[in-house]
Image (cartoon, helix red, strand yellow):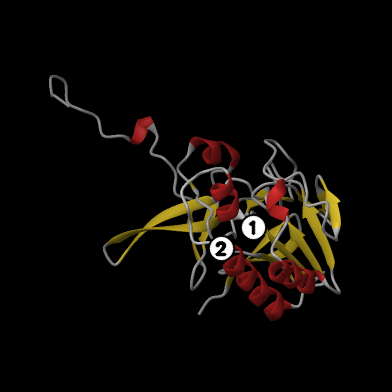
Amino acid sequence: MKTGFEFGLAGARLMARAAGTLWWAEPGLLCVSDLHLGKSERIARRGGTLLPPYETVDTLARLDAEIAALDPAVVICLGDSFDDLLSTELPEAEALWLARLMAGRRWIWIAGNHDPGPVGLGGAHLAECHEGPLTFRHIAVPGAGAGEVSGHYHPKARITAQGQLLSRPCFLIDRARAILPAFGTYTGGLATTDPALGALMGPEAVAVLTGRRAICLPMPRAASPASAPRRRPGSRG
């Protein structure tokens, strides 16, 4: 089973893992984006639809599995790690779990648009982070130089498998940048056919779908007007 897709970015050899994390083996760096811990609590607090309050446990369990498998020296969380500032007040058991994951390694929180940084927790708190040839930030910057790693958009790709249309979180990768999928259990997603993603990614971009195995395919895009079927003169649409 293919656990990841290997690629190069600005001279760094990286792996987009099937679990939805980015692994840079040379410095032992694990990157994850958009955990959105505490989302069910935030929705309930604001009077929204009640969701089973288990997403933080599930998200931490999957992150724990990645850390156990790779034993990273550095972990970078690319922003929106918590659903809002009040969500940083985790229940004691979950707070201790997160503290255990952070212990003994360099941990970097990148500020997101949902959380300007969980400043009450340990680790470093940065607007963006530069590691070797790579720049880690929450939201991609149009025209940024090669080596940008970001999140924010929660990209998802649709594929047809065994006659069924499936939608999976995915990485988007081109020569200049990589956009990570959301790692949080209750996060939604933006289709790769959305113009916002089409404008960011180069024509050679690929999507690496997450799940039981990593699947790489050309980035699905919206059909251009020129490729749409033309009607014959006088025909009715």
Q: Position of residue 223 (x, y in %)?
A: 38, 38
Residue 37 tag number: 1
- Determine which residue is flagged by label 2: 55
**Residue 200, located in which quarter of the rendered image?**
top right
| Residue ID at (29%, 61%) | 164
Q: Is residue 60 above or below residue 143?
A: below
- Left/right of residue 14 with respect to residue 109 in the rendered view: left
Dot 1 crowding, Cα within 10 Å, few <14, some 14–19, many 20+: many
Q: Identify which residue, 38 or 227, lies in the foreground.
A: 38
Dot 2 crowding, Cα within 10 Å, few <14, some 14–19, many 20+: many
Q: Is residue 237 above or below residue 202?
A: above
| Residue ID at (83%, 54%) | 120
- Left/right of residue 173 with respect to residue 124 in the rendered view: left
**Cα–Cα span, label 1 and label 2:** 7 Å
Labels 1 & 2 near each other (Cβ < 8 A): yes
Name the secondary structure under disc 2: helix
Q: Quadrant of the C terminus?
A: top left
Name the secondary structure under disc 1: loop
Query: Mark 1 or mark 2: which comes first in sequence?
Result: 1
Q: Position of residue 82 (x, y in %)?
A: 68, 53
Q: Amino acid at mark 1?
A: Leu
- Left/right of residue 126 with respect to residue 170 in the rendered view: right
Q: Identify which residue, 154 or 237, lies in the foreground.
A: 154
